[in-house]
Image: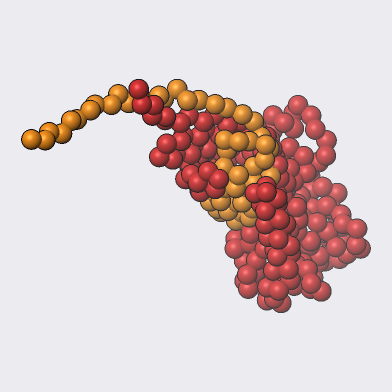
Chain colours: A orange, B red
Amino acid sequence: MSHRNFEEEDVNIDFGDWESDGGLNIFMGMSKRNGLFVELRASAYSETNPTIKFIVGYTFR
Amino acid sequence: MLIRIALIALGLIFTSLNQTIEVFGQESTAGGTMTGCLLKSGSPGFYMLQEQGTGLTTTVAGSDDLQKGDLEKYSVGSKVQLTGRLVREEGRDVFRVTHVEQLSATCETTTMHVSVESLKDAVGRATVGVRGGLGLDPELPFLGLHAQLGPIVKGLWFRPSYEFGFGEVTKINSFNFDFAYYPDLTLRGRGMDRADFWNVYFGAGGLITCRTAISRKRT
C-alpha cells in the first residue's frame, strides 16, 4: 500500500525589497507642433532603471 | 556595453536625420502666417523669426509684394505677424514675406540672460503632458507624466518627468530632471505645412530611481 505525502511549504512574499539609485539620462527625439513626440533615451550609471527607453508622448498646448 | 550601443544608436539616428532633411527637401511652397520675434540675421536681406513658446527660428526674407525696408524696420526685436510662403531656396527653407504686421514693439525673446524674472516667466508658460513606452534591460512597459518649462535660455527647456514602470515582479519609479535643447533643425516630409514638421531635440539630465521587487522566500 502506498500513500502520498503532501508537504506544505511556507512562502514569505516580501514586498520590502526596495532600492534606489541615481543616474544620467541622454536622449534625443522629435516633436510635432501639436504636441506629439517620440524619444529614444539611454540611461547610464543606474542599475535599476532600464538602459534604453522608447517613449511616445503628448504635450498639451 | 549597452550604454555604448545606445550612444552609437543615438549618433546614427542623429546623422540619419540630417541626411533625411536633405533627401526630403522639396521645392514646393505653402502659404500661411507666422508669429514671433523678428531679429536680424548675419546675411543682408534675411532675418530670423523666433517663435515664442518653442524658440524655433525660421529664416525669413522679403518678396516682391513687400515694400523695401518693412522687415528691416521691425527687425529690432518687434513681435510681428508675417504672411507669406515657405519656399525651398538653395537647400534651406525661407519664408518669403508678402505682408508684415507689427503686434508689439518688443517681444519676449528668448535670450541667454538668466534671471529670476525669466525663470518665473518660464514656469508660468509651463505645459504638461503624458508619456508611455517600453524600457529595455530590464524590459518594462511604463507610463508617466511630464512638465515642460521654458525656454529658460535660448532653445533650452527644463523637462522634469515621472515614469512608473510595471513589470510582473519589478516596479520602478523614475524621477527625471532633463534639459532638452531644440536646435534650429526640423525634419519634414514632402509637404511644406509647418504643422507636419518634426522639431528635433536632444538633451541630458539626472535621474533618481526607486525600485521595488517582490521576492519569494521559502522557509
Which residue is located at x 48 percent, y 44 percent? B140
Q: Residue furthest bottom?
A: B27
Q: Is residue B28 left or right of residue B45?
A: left
Can you say whether A23 is above or below B96 in the image? Answer: above
Q: Is residue B43 left or right of residue B78?
A: right
Near-viewer residue (B93 or B144): B144
Can you say whether B140 is above or below A33 in the image? Answer: above
Image coordinates for residue B31, horizontal then vertical, percent? 65, 69
Question: Is residue A45 visible in this depiction of the protein?
Answer: yes
Quarter of the picture containing the C terminus of chain B is: top left
Question: Is residue B125 visible in this depiction of the protein?
Answer: no
Image coordinates for residue B133, horizontal then vertical, percent? 50, 48
Which residue is located at x 63 percent, y 70 percent? B189
Q: Residue furthest front?
A: A1
Which residue is located at x 74 percent, y 32 percent? B118
State how many labels appear: 0
Which residue is located at x 85 percent, y 62 percent? B46
Can you say whether A49 is above or below A21 in the image? Answer: below
Image coordinates for residue B193, horizontal then vertical, percent? 62, 66
Res B197 → quadrant: bottom right
Near-viewer residue (B183 or B51): B183
Image coordinates for residue B30, horizontal then vertical, percent? 65, 70
Near-viewer residue (B25 or B75): B25
